[in-house]
Amino acid sequence: MLAWKLVRSEKIAPPHAVFNARVKVPNAVFSDGRAKCPKHQIGRINVTVDEVADKLSDITYREMFDLIRNGTWAENSRLPSENEMARQFNVSRPVIRQALARLRTEGLILSRRGSGSFVTRKPSSDVQFPVIASIADIAPFSSFREGVEGESAALAAERRTDKQLEMLRSVSTCQPGDSIEDSAGRDFKFHVGIAEASGNPFYVNTLLSLRTQIQLCMNLTWNIAAFSSDFNKAVNHEHQEIFDAIEAKDPERARTAMRHHVCSSHKRLMEGQTGKS
């Protein structure tokens, strides 16, 4: 079995620089038992600093996630400073910021200017959905969302209150100047708001349990949006169609509009990944 060692040294080279990572390769023997190579022969692979930083942020995120899940970082507690965490996890501050941004996206922490970051909730352990490990996983996930969110929108059209309708109106539109994080956050609030308007807590809990998967897809699509002038118009138009149907209390129209929106979002993501327009 290969024994890989990842050296946390992303501070010493500029982004995109290439360096050699040392890796142990396994013993190999001939049929007569003679060793083909020394026990700890060292091989070499080329790895960019960006790739190492991405890997380190993933590792750091998982370590932080576990600290929140096991209660070491308790709900409502203040996290250590970036400098303290950089020392604790033996990584640079940019890596810490990447990991914290992911925790913020998942709603596990909240950052307050001048006060630091605080734990808002523990990760949900009630439902364990599969992770999205590749682009191929997005198609079945989108199909699942079509069914769940289509019915959620239909119920919202039947049951929404005026207050819930105003909340949906406030998050239904994304502006071209918004950051990717703001656009994806507003997008997610719109979908969760519809689930809340359905009056069925199971829809809300399902979306919250799928926050990581949904926001992964949203972040990917909003990253693609940065290179497409038509993206904002398309999303805003689809959101408006959903909103109008819910406002009109037309469940069938709301269901159709939501299913179309989720399907179109998947299509835009796939076209962006393959370079099509």
Image (tube, rainbow, N blue to C red):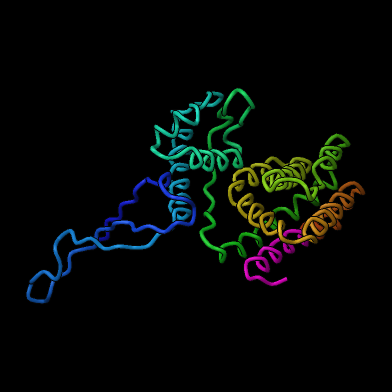
The quadrant in which residue 205 appears is top right
At a point 27% along the width and 60% down the height, the residue shown is: 2
Left or right, 81 with respect to 120, comes to: left
Q: Characterize the magenta stretch by its predominant secondary structure.
A: helix
Q: Position of residue 45 (x, y in %)?
A: 34, 63
Q: Nearer the viewer, residue 115 or 238?
A: 115
Q: Quadrant of the N terminus?
A: bottom left
Determine whether, in the image, residue 245 is placed left or right of residue 89.
right
Q: Is residue 44 above or below residue 239?
A: below
**Residue 157 highlighted magenta (yes or no):** no
| Quadrant of residue 171 within the rendered picture | top right
**Residues shaded magenta:** 259-277
Of residue 201 and residue 52, the one placed in the foreground of this image is 52
Q: Is residue 241 above or below residue 73?
A: below
Instruction: Please name the residue shown 54% across and 57% down the image.
Output: 132
Residue found 85% across the figure and 46% down from its top: 158
